[in-house]
Amino acid sequence: MTKHFILRATFVLACLSLMAALTARANGLAGSKAERAIAAQSYQTSVPAITKSAGQSAAQSAAKANSIVAKTRATPAKQPAAPINAANKQTQADITYTVKKGDTLYGIAKLFGTSVELLQTKNHINEPRLLQIGTVLHIPGAKTFESIPAIDEKTSVVKVLQATLTAYTAGVESTGKRPGHPLYGITASGTHAQEGRTIAVDPKVIPIGTKVYIEGIGFRTAEDTGSAIKGAKIDVFMNDVKQARKFGVKKNRKVYVLSEDEKKIM
């Protein structure tokens, strides 16, 4: 009984191995006459039948392969998404500048890092010497504005200053007031001083309530004044006295005073 079982199992394994070999060889219409003869004997059929079966198997495999290739060609591969260029995500509008007394086209061009020719072409100016006070000029290719965020077509530059910057706090070291004082932290305009927003200015140079952009600092709003803040000087409000002292004095920082449309408390 055991011997019969072993023989039967051996025969089954041999058949399985032969089937695997036949399948692999059939795909290429391979196999010798001896192999086909053994297959015919094992499956109790004829050699021509085995050959025909192998041919059919190969044909079916080829047909399936051709179908896959056809589908691949019909469906184009997905192209990787192009990276978003942050510089192109938002198109910056032209900056405008309001001509004031004493301005020249050459001076304005130099101020914004552009050329007189570009200013003339953009603003349809035939005679630069006839520039009128109050004229709003569009500034093409303003290099100085490339790093300024959130500029839209409503923004106009009233003037540009070369200012000296210092920093101050709400404390006694800057204002003479201590916490608990009714005016502690209150600006000359009546607002609560806020870091990242409040600056002290000379109202004769920058009117209270005006929004400005300070090179290297960002947008700020003129809300406060100071006895030592005269002319082209600006005091930047900070909460921490150590940070204010560390800020020190920064000279010749370009300050862009923005138009009436931008004169809103942030």
Image (cartoon, grey):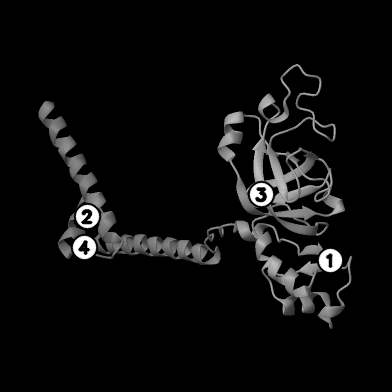
Give me the C-alpha separation between circle 1 and circle 2.
100 Å
Give me the C-alpha separation between circle 4 and circle 3.
93 Å
Query: Mark 1 belongs to which amino acid?
Result: Val
In the picture shown, does residue 134 fall above or below 179?
below
User: Helix, strand or loop at disc 4?
Assistant: loop
Labels 2 and 4 touching (C-beta < 8 A): yes
Residue 215: x %, y % from top left:
65, 52
Q: Tell me the residue at 22%/54% (across/down).
A: 39
> Seen in the image, is 82 located left or right of residue 95?
left
- Judging by the rendered image, the residue that carries numbered circle 3 is 164
Residue 15: x %, y % from top left:
21, 46
- Mark 1 or mark 2, earlier in chain: 2
- Mark 4 or mark 3, earlier in chain: 4
- Judging by the rendered image, the residue that carries numbered circle 4 is 31
User: Helix, strand or loop at disc 1?
Assistant: loop
Labels 4 and 1 touching (C-beta < 8 A): no
- Judging by the rendered image, the residue that carries numbered circle 1 is 99
Give me the C-alpha separation between circle 2 and circle 3.
99 Å
Q: Tell me the residue at 79%/72% (across/down).
A: 104
- Mark 2 or mark 3, earlier in chain: 2
- Mark 2 or mark 4, earlier in chain: 4
Labels 1 and 2 touching (C-beta < 8 A): no
Front residue (pair 191, 89): 191
Labels 3 and 1 touching (C-beta < 8 A): no
